[in-house]
Amino acid sequence: TGSHGTAGIKEIKFVGGMVMVQDPATAEYDQMPRSAIATGLVDYVLAPEDMPAALLRYVNHAYLQAGPEAVSPGQEAAETVKRVLALLRTRTRYDFRCYRKSMLMRRVQRRMGLLHLDRVDDYLKRLREDPEEVAALDKDLLIGVTAFFREPEAFVVLTEQVIPELISHADGDRAIRVWCCGCATGEEAYSLAMGLIEQFTAVKRVPNFQIFASDVSEASLEVARQGSYPESIVSDVSPERLRRFFTRVGENHYQVSKQIRDPIIFAQQNMLSDPPFSKLDLISCRNLLIYLEPEVQTKAIQMFHFALKDGAYLMLGPSESIGRALELFEPVARKSRVYRRLPQGRPTRLELPLVPRRGRDATTAKPGAGARGELRTSELMQHALTHYAPASVLINRSHEILSMQGPLVDYLEFPPGQPTQNLLTLARQGLRTKIRALCQKAIDGNAPVVDSSAHVRRNGQYIACSITARPIIEPREAQGWLLVVFQDRFDERAEPLTSTPPAPESPLVRQMEDELRTARDDLRSTTEDFESANEELKASNEEVMSVNEELQSANEELESSKEELQSLNEELSTVNSQLQDKVDELDRANADLTSLLDSTEIATLFLDTELRVKRFTPGITDLVNLRPGDLGRPVADFATNFQDDPLLADCRRALEKLTSVERQMQSFGGQSCIRRVFPYRTGGNRIEGLIVTYTNISQLVAARKLIDEGEAYRHVVTHLPVAAIFVSDTHLYINEAAEALTGYRQGELATLDAWFAALFGARKEEVSTLYQGRKTRGRTDAIVVTLTRKDGAQRTIELSGAPSGGIEIIVLRDVTEKRLLQRQVLEIASREQQRVGQELHDVLLQDLTGLALLADAARHGLGAEGGGRELMAKLAGGLEQLNAKVRALCEGLIPVEIDAGDLKSALEALCESTRNAHGPSVTLEADPLEDLDPQTAHQFYRIAQEAVANAVRHGHPRSIVIRLLQRDAGA
């Protein structure tokens, strides 16, 4: 998967090991080396052939050869390590003095081994000269190794016991507050957030919690804020949680979802010096306390108690515990290191910083469990038991008892009432003055002092004894302390107490005299000290008065500062509200931008300066084989659906020249697009990558092709002399024939309406309606109208046209001469027809009539008998029929003169004559006729006459209907 070994690297670094990784440039498959390097925990990145030598140099270093027992450095090396820590404190502003010295030495020696340095002084010199090594050591000492759901058993306790109880007691309006202390790169904080969301969902409540994740390393916090982790987390996070809380980014990374990141605030904070968060429900501080000194651990536990609410929870690492703070916390799951805060009668006292102050005077240490633990009392008492078996006490310069050993009841009295730790108060009669003087001598001379002349009152008599005061030299923390040892002397018998005064030469008298002298000296010294103290008190009083005035001034300044702080707090609240509004506005803007990018048809690709994919719109997937999981991969890894070899070169050119690069591309599917590459500029005018857009111009190319073809077509039409042609799309074009027909030039009239108005005048609407009506009905036949030229001449034209692909084409044909010729032909034919009819009527019909009369006379002249009469009858009948036909033919040939208003009357007469001549019923249905010239009326009559004759001749109908309807404005 490319991530094997990453988890092992973390464990190796956790215990202070060394990690060596192959240089990805030399690897055939570089996913695994890159995944390891991405952890930031790698010490060497080398080619395989360089690894053995580096490994041998490392393992042969004195740090590894000496073994674990050689961790404790010598006195000189320890002082050098202190200088190393001082240098780190100066360069990084982080104080490592509170860390365990053995751990610090191991880490320093490990860095020395990596750099092949044998002396600490050489390493200190390297630190002073190399800032990168300072950063590397700082990173090594912080040990930012963590993982999702580390120690799963502890998280089971957390999710099954702790979080459900927090949710059940949570107020609906108040969020559960959690502090993840020492969060490193954020895995621990995100694990807590996932557990909280799961438990809120389980009880069907809206998640309401706030996690404060803090760490001293800003670099680790930056990783945590991004929430992007390598693929190796699949070994720590279940598949269900991966699907629910993570998004796959690229081939080997997972991004924490927004619902997990939003409730977490990552902040840089030094737990040892900065104030903690307060009113918390849960603190998770795992694998941090184990690196601290015991005293600092105790203070940290007290700080956690201060920060938590009553009944809240504390979770520590598997190797950590609350120590002796049993009055502060009770265990909930001892094995998993989960504790519950116990209430206290008085508030927990918080001491900041937790790091011990430099230069602290050990002689002012107060008695107590903490002091005894800090100064290793048990070691001192073991020393006393070994060398001084008699009764002994360990005191400081204030004569306060720190520890006791042996039969002290023979030398000290423990009165009832308020207990005291002052040795002088507890000393039996006869010892108090001796002890004070002896301790002062030991302190002044810094050497053991013995007084063998002391007597202690015990059981009604004075017992001779010796007192030894021995200053403590080692360890350094105990300098200024005294070990006071009491022993009875058996070379002098005890003297009983009597009412008679002892002899002057008795030892008791000598002791009492010595005590008296000592008391006088003490009184004199006390008087002098009192006078000196009185003078100092006067001076101090003056200083106090001055300080009081300063305090009053400071108090006024504090009041003013308080008002300023209140004003600042209000301003901060306003700013916070404004920031929240800005966040909401940014969320909306981001949503709008995302919707805009998703809805646009422009395929867009966002690249960083390394030409890796940062973001893309859905439209790009049709051109480049991209998927949502490809974020972070180089654009060169992807195939395109078209030949785009110059893409990388254009991208580099755009970055170098800071200009846009445009190129037209052709896809394999025949689609055309324009690819533009231009730099991505931030609000601060910084170049942080490139934007690549692909605009589909297939329709534009096709339209351009059509336009080019249309231009060619228009050119042909323009020069076509056959007819006047009008072409109308976005513009109106006419050919040369149209200019010749109308007398108008191209461009004089811009629209068809203007042309119709100029050519047809008052009949413009009539002609336009007639033309549009025919076009709507899909008729392509021409209409005959009269137009008026620009010079006023009138021409008869045939107007026709039809739309074609959004272009309207109108054709005008000049039929003036044609119509005139047709009219002349009709007139000639009519005159010839009239002449033939007249000849038939005047000559042939008269001859036939005469023959018919002769035949009839011959028939009457023949007798009734015989066949001649019958034949003559047939001849007469035939002549009669021929006469009728010739008469009918004459009626058809001889035109009837009809006026415009007599057309209906003439048609009615035609119906009557046909009915009388041939017998069928003939009826007329005619609309009122208007605006017909005589010639048109005559033509209509002839049409009806021919139609009726044909019907009678060929159809033998029983009835005939003649309908005459007027449509299309008389046409």
Image (spheres, rainbow, N blue to C red):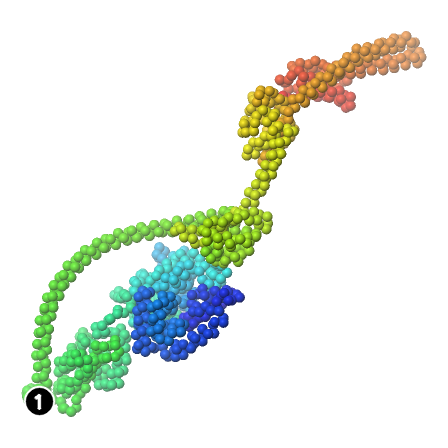
Residue in the image at 43% along x and 56% along y:
258
Task: Give x and y (percent) for residue 422.
Answer: 18, 76
Q: Is residue 574 left or right of residue 620?
A: left
Task: Give x and y (percent) for residue 101.
Answer: 33, 74
> Which residue is labeled 1 in the image?
506
Hey, which residue is sitting farthest right in the picture? 866
Residue in the image at 73% along x and 21% along y:
947
Residue in the image at 46% along x and 66% along y:
36
Task: Give x and y (percent) for residue 48.
Answer: 49, 70
Q: Nearer the viewer, residue 669 or 497?
A: 669
Crowdedness near tag 1: few (<14), some (14–19) or many (≥20) residues, C-alpha within 10 Å = few
Residue in the image at 56% along x and 21% along y:
762
Task: Give x and y (percent) for residue 130.
Answer: 36, 67
Q: Is residue 839 left or right of residue 410?
A: right
Q: Nearer the viewer, residue 679 or 851?
A: 679
- Measured along the vertical axis of the image, is residue 152 above or below residue 892? below
Regarding residue 231, the answer to whether it shows in the image is: yes
Q: Amino acid under label 1?
A: Ser
Q: Is residue 267 left or right of residue 7?
A: left
Regarding residue 199, the answer to whether it shows in the image is: no
- Measured along the vertical axis of the image, is residue 428 above or below residue 206? below
- Measured along the vertical axis of the image, is residue 758 above or below residue 358? above
Q: Is residue 857 left or right of residue 18?
A: right
Q: Quadrant of the C terminus?
A: top right
Q: Secondary structure at mark 1?
A: loop
Counting every numbered tag in the picture gives: 1
Give the quadrant of residue 486.
Answer: bottom left
